[in-house]
Image (cartoon, grey):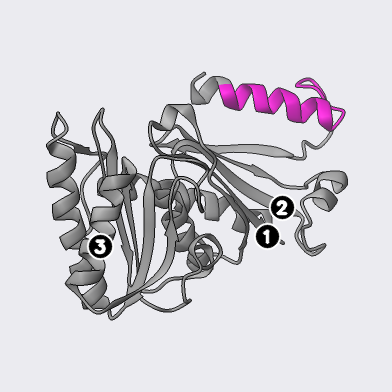
Amino acid sequence: MNEEILEKVLGETQSRVNGTSKESSAPHRHVTEFVGTAMGDTVGLVIANLDPQLHEYMKLDKKYRSIGFLSARTGGAPHVMAADEAVKATNTEVVSIEMARDTKGGAGHGATIIFAAEDVSDARRAVEITLEAVEKNFGNVYSSDAGHIELHYTARASMALEKGFNALVGKSFGIIVGAPAAIGLVMADTAVKTANVDVVTYASPNNGTARSNEIIISITGDSGAVKQSLLAAQEVGLSVLSSMGEIPRSGSTPTLI
């Protein structure tokens, strides 16, 4: 389903929910809005006025009327990093980050991220920023049929990374992912031996992941040290993954360095 068809379907749905039709002259109040798509089979949408029952079940603060949300079949860390940029630039809160096992993601995760906002324009802008940043972040994901490695960096972590990876807000932060899990462990060991960094989180197939065949660590420390650790982990990860068959390729233009 392309974007034009999806927008038409959502428009018809909105009309029925609001008791209007295309021929009606009554004001059209948008309920759901398609924002866009990105790599990783990612879709971004906005609901301007979330249904009260869902609002209650989602345990949202009553001050938030609108939500923006993204779902991806492939990804996880690229999306959380992207969401972190979005909350820095908008008046939104990341209320939910879920990284589910998805069969299309090979050894890795899919992702669902929800932003809450008092103003629908903030929710929409958060989704727009996230979609744009996802494209950039996939430059640091290297994949092949055998597996993948990921390395993500920010000089200043914010609330999305705090929620998703227990990052210290305002501190330099990095994420290292390797699949199959053995590659992730070698990358993690290399990273912490390379520079003076602290491990913030550690996740493995049976602990902290959605049973994905990955080892994921996040690190913090001095900005230069974090980058040095990430680059060392990248070198060893690419070397091991390449030995398993085809050369892993980046999803877009790498931005780590």
Which is more toward the observer, 196 or 226? 196
- Residue type at tag 3: Asp
Q: Quadrant of residue 232?
A: bottom left
Q: Which residue is mark 3?
A: 189
**Residue 105: x and y, percent?**
41, 32
- Residue type at tag 2: Ser
Q: Which residue is mark 1?
A: 117
Q: Magenta part mainly helix, strand or loop?
A: helix
Q: Nearer the viewer, mark 2 or mark 3?
A: 3
The residue at 49%/47% (across/down) is: 206
- Residue type at tag 1: Ala
Q: Is residue 194 something that shows in the picture?
A: yes
Which span of residues is magenta-colored? 6-25
**Residue 51: x and y, percent?**
83, 44
Q: Nearer the viewer, mark 1 or mark 3?
A: 3
Q: Are marks 1 and 2 in contact (CB under 8 Å)?
A: yes
Q: Is residue 11 magenta?
A: yes
Which is more toward the observer, 167 or 37? 167
The residue at 82%/62% (across/down) is: 62
Q: CA distance from mark 1 to mark 3?
A: 40 Å
Q: Which residue is mark 2?
A: 66
Q: Is residue 1 magenta?
A: no
